[in-house]
Image (cartoon, coloured by chain):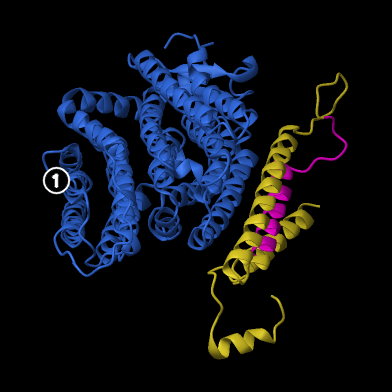
Chain colours: A blue, B yellow
Amino acid sequence: MNLLVIAPVLLPLLAGILLLLLPQSRLSLHRTLSVVAVAAQIGLTLALMATVSDGRILIYALGNWPAPFGIVLVADRLAAWMLVITALLALFALLYALRGDDRTGRYFHVLFQLQLLGLNGAFLTGDLFNLFVFFEILLLASYGLLLHGGGRRRTRAGLHFVVVNLAGSTLFLFAVGTLYGVLGTLNMADLAIKVAAAPPENVPLVRAAGLLLFGVFALKAALLPFYLWLPAAYAYTSASVAALFAIMTKVGAYSILRVYTLIFGPEAGPATNLIELWLLPLALATLMVGMIGAVASTHLRQQAAYLVVASVGSLLTAFGLNSSAGVAAGLYYLPHTTFAAAALFLLADLISRQRGVMSDRLDPGPDLPDSRLLGALFFITAIAVAGLPPLAGFLGKFLMLRAALDHALLPWVMGTVLIAALLGLIALARTGSLLFYRVNPEAETEAPWPTIWAETTPIIGLLLLLLGLTVGAGPVFDQSRMIADQVLQPQLYIQAVMNPGGTP
Amino acid sequence: MEALIALIVGVLTACGVYLALRARTFPVVMGLTFLSYAVNVFLFAMSHLTIGQPPVITADAAGYADPLPQALVLTAIVISFGMTAFVIVLALKAYAELGNDHVDGKEETGVRRQASGHRGPL
């Protein structure tokens, strides 16, 4: 029994309950507690990552029921990696929210903690139905956060987001039900064993359920046919929530990586590499569509949202290469693209507040009071988002392309990734010059919001994290290579869950 | 009985999908509710239909009914209940803020609006 495994789930849950009990009028108390909880979560997840870095896979069997009879939480390198990224992102999103987003409605901090509960649970769980439950927790919290503060456009985007995700949840249940009906288990490690040994007459059903699950995860990850909910939802919610949501699409990407390496992975017998045919082409198409959307955007936050779509595309391109090097490159690129997208959302909010009535519309607007500071930050963020040297995004893309060198679809991967990078560069360069150079002196500025240094602190923090990823590229990439090795050896996971304490 | 259950799930799903694709929030909410009913019946039946069998171990049992789908379906019902409540409140909020119950928040214009006016609230 290792309590460290369940602590990242319990901590936000307890913090959320405590915040709910405190009187709503004590905002400063709420803020302090929320920040302390997130800071503690960073400490916990770092400790967890250090514990599992030697390749151990820690199991927490809830109620001490052994797998496959009870639900287990499983902490391996991949889960710990995702937890650390989530906690770091949450800290900066929360710090930005303290500047005002949490004042526009009630229970912001409660919802924020419950969102973290759902995210952490989804990364840790080793049970497919439990994954559904944690998905619902994070979605329900995200509905609340998305609509926080209200407003017409936010309500409309929220309605679409909620309806699409409810339909997705129904599909998830159909897939889970089919798998249970055929195989009689929902524990992911046990499922991997049962799928590999499925009798031939059940194989079509198992494959159908597997592909249905892929549809659900593609919806969460905003993969090509299912990305339409994302741009409006992310563009109209408050900046700190949009920044936190940068990790939400990565939950879908994580689920795809986990389920299709473990259950339908290389050793799954009749369902081996189930989605190999689908993932790479869809990911490349998503990357392209996201970048085209970014070029065509008329508002800065819409552009940031399309860049999130594109980032999922490049992430899943790396995972779709179906090789250790590809997965390692994707895992190295994941924190970079998450933090960069979050920084862009926060910065877009600061810029649009300074532009007064022009908001974030991409037309020549007033001269910004703090154009130097904001311009410099935008320049660095744009370099990060577009994946230019010297930041880690370039290294991630380089590693990705190197991993694709001996892949059958190399021309397509190379062409799409490079053209998409060019499109991203064009989009961001146009935005930058519109915002900071092509100033329209007659544009009215009605009492622009003064930037104070404190408001840029979370953005600078995120950019420093990106710098850290670049400077520490060697150790970080070693770490992602070790994660990839572990993920692509599903028998390690199965062994740890089904036979805990046994000889490896 | 299998055919009947399969038919129920199929009809509920078809109605749910049709209604969820409508342009007004009320039928969309109804459609999502139908979909969740369909999936609940489906989950309930997923470990094969058995009659008169004990779910827990007894000495003289000839066979067993699987108790797990009932636990799963209970969880699914609670979650879909909460989600439905939320989406109803959200639809009402959208109606109040946007001034109509179209899912895109704007009325259809011109001829189509008149044509749809004769079909009643759906």
As drawn, the residue found furthest toward the bottom would be B111
Of A301 and B35, which appears nearest the observer? A301
Q: Which residues are magenta?
A: B28-54
Tell me where residue A101 sits by quadrant: top left
Of A297 and A286, which appears nearest the observer? A297
Query: Is the N terminus of chain A in the top left, top right, bottom left or bottom right quadrant?
Result: top right
Tell me where residue A353 sits by quadrant: bottom left
- Expressed as whole percent of the image width and height from the top left, the position of residue A71 reads 60, 25
Few, some or many C-alpha atoms within 10 Å of disc 1 (few <14, some 14-19, many ≥20)? some
Residue at left offset 34%, top offset 59%: A302
Q: Is residue A222 left or right of residue B9?
A: left
Q: Is residue A344 left or right of residue A241?
A: left
Of A34 and A57, which appears nearest the observer? A34
B22 above or below A5? below
Q: Secondary structure at mark 1?
A: loop
- Expressed as whole percent of the image width and height from the top left, the position of residue A245 reads 42, 44
Residue at the spot of label 1: A388
